[in-house]
Image (cartoon, rainbow, N blue to C red):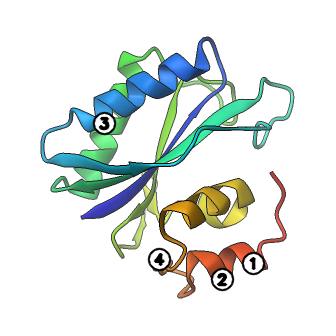
Amino acid sequence: MISYLSLGSNLGDRRLYMEKARQAIEALEATKLLAQTEVIETKAWGRRDQPDFLNSILKVDTELSAWQLLSHCLQIEENLGRKRTIKWCARVIDIDILLYGDEVIDSERLTIPHPGLTERKYLLNLMMKLDANLLHPREGKTIKELYKEASCEN
């Protein structure tokens, strides 16, 4: 299943955490890294009283289910020192599943497509570089169309 994962870090050695997260994802069995966007810097989303984030998106092909992939991502975050605290706080690493094929999942623990994908123009911009013609499974529009329509900032 082709999946898109966002990586973000705004504490400590941000580049190191991003690289270690990428390496850990690449090392997962039944998962192959297909592409990665450049790493960009953005203002923090939600609470603006924190350091800027570094962000990147990985395109992976995985045989893991969305739930297995989520479990691995949470374990990678924990292994790299992420502490679960209040929402929108600073973190050493944040890994989100943006898209998992054309699946739509709505649960308390996992929402796919990730709602931030259409709310954050920088994510759409990065996705444009990976696959501008990819169809968003909930919106029924391509990433390119969503990017052109985006009135969001950051």
Q: Residues within 10 Å of mark 4 (few under 14, many from 20)?
A: some
* Residue type for callout 3: Ile
**Residue positioned 25% across, 57% down in the render:** 61
Whether residue 145 is visible here, answered yes or no, is yes
Q: Residues within 10 Å of mark 3 (few under 14, many from 20)?
A: many
User: Which mark is first along the chain, 4 or 1?
Assistant: 4
91 sits to left or right of 137: right
User: Which mark is first along the chain, 3 or 1?
Assistant: 3
User: Which mark is first along the chain, 2 or 3?
Assistant: 3
User: Which mark is first along the chain, 4 or 2?
Assistant: 4
* Residue type for callout 2: Glu
- Mark seen at residue 134: 4
- Could you tell me which secondary element the residue under label 2 belongs to? helix
Q: Circles 1 and 2: CB distance less than 8 Å?
A: yes
Name the residue that disc number 1 marks: 148
Q: Residues within 10 Å of mark 1 (few under 14, many from 20)?
A: few
Q: Quadrant of the N terminus?
A: bottom left
Q: Circles 3 and 4: CB distance less than 8 Å?
A: no
Residue 58, percent across and down?
43, 48
Q: Circles 2 and 4: CB distance less than 8 Å?
A: no
